[in-house]
Amino acid sequence: MRIRLLSAIFAGAMLFPAVVSARTSLLQEDFNGDFPPSGWTVEPGPGPGGWHRAPDHGYHPWTDNQTPYALLYGNSIGPGGTVMTSPPVNCEGYSRVMLRCSTNVRTSPGPHSSKLYVSAAGGPYQMIAEYQGVDFNRLETLDISSLAGGEPDVRMSWRFSGDKVLISYWCVDNVSVVGDIPRFDVGVSRIVAPADTVDSGAVVTPEIWVNSYTSQPVVDRFKVEMHIGPGYRDSVFVDSLSAYDSIRVSFRDWGATEVGWTTISSETFLQGDADPDNNIRSGSFFVKTPGGIGSDPCSRPEPAQMSVWPNPAGRFVSLALPSPGIRAVRLYDAGGRLLAEYPCLGRRKLDLDISSFSPGAYFVRAEDQTCRLVIE
């Protein structure tokens, strides 16, 4: 999630939410149709001597599963064993890949092999589960991301070999493979320049820090924009960003001309961002006369009227107060009900977190001055 932060004078802690992702079904098989199903292979061939659809040949050990399933049972296994392999599954672009299947198995601990393997991109098969000497009936959820994540041609293979009397039965049903498409997330973590106070006539190179907030590298090129006052706008493109990495971005120079408060904001634009509505860091700074009136931040000319920006606002809003003697700022809903009160004695600027309030119209009041605020 991109983080909308406070004004440029605040450093703000960086947050690292988990990567957001969209789950996709990559394979589904319930063994209710023809056996082997389309794309599946059984060696040396389907039938009572190896993997077959139950209860086609009469034996039905999984009595609480009334729909067909894949079955192997000991009394009919021939020499050399039997193998059932899934069709290829394309896991390219998926960061987290899970294999789920219902398994009902009863085997002995003697010299035989009953194992589940995974192969990716034509590579060797690697064991992910072993059923020698076990007896259970359960829905298995196996994380195969380390083997299958981002890989093409992923295959699952249920393999038995050894003494046929050492397996009572091995039942498999409802095989599914799901993958997560990562949705990346970047945001502006800090506005470095311009600083809180800038001399009139100074030339400043605006700079920000951009962060990745996800555990996957951002490989898509994305744009970062900077806005200062009503007349400055510049954009820079970032080619890539490593997981949880930061990059310092500089924009074209900006010249301070008018004395007074100036608004500033920076925003990232990444296609497929986890939260595109929450991607701005904004605030304000003060342009002062060098060595003259307003050179001391404590002696800045006070605004004649309270001002609110940005307006409409998102998660944060900044207030310029008409006097440091104001004790509190109050927030009201459109019906005049007091919602919150913010102490501000001795301050001329106040930054408020309004993320807990619903979108709509509100009123901000400081003594006898009232501003209408719209929250998006």
Image (cartoon, helix red, strand yellow):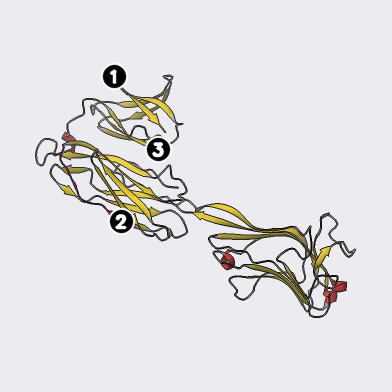
Q: Tell me the crowding category of disc 3: few under 14, some 14 to 19, or many 20 or more residues within 10 angstroms, Cα based.
A: some
Count residues near mark 1 (Cα–Cα under 10 Å), then give few for <14, some for 14-19, many for 20+.
few
Which residue is identified by label 2? 248
Please report contact status of discs 1 and 2: CB closer than 8 Å, yes or no: no
Q: Nearer the viewer, residue 249 or 52?
A: 52
* Mark before the other along the chain sequence, 3 or 1: 3
**Quadrant of image for the C terminus:** top left
The residue closer to the viewer here, 226 or 64, is 226
Q: Amino acid at mark 1?
A: Asp
- Alpha carbon separation for disc pair 2 and 3: 24 Å
Relative to residue 233, is residue 248 depicted above or below?
A: below
The residue where tag 3 is placed is 315
Quadrant in the rendering for residue 219:
bottom left
Quarter of the image where one finds residue 363: top left
Dot 2 lies on which element?
strand
* Position of residue 228 in the picture relative to residue 311 (left or right): left
User: Dot 2, crowdedness within 10 Å: few (<14), some or many (≥20)?
Assistant: few
Q: Is residue 315 left or right of residue 146?
A: left
Question: What segment is highlighted magenta in the picture?
Answer: 247-258
Q: Which residue position holds label 1?
A: 368
Quarter of the image for residue 24 reads: bottom right
**Magenta-span inclusion, residue 32:** no
Can you see residue 294? yes
Q: CA distance from mark 3 to mark 1?
A: 26 Å
| Circle 1 SS class | loop
Q: Compare marks 1 and 2 and give the one earlier in the sequence.
A: 2
Q: Give the residue displayed 32% in from the left and 48% down from the top.
A: 225
Q: Position of residue 144 (x, y in %)?
A: 61, 64
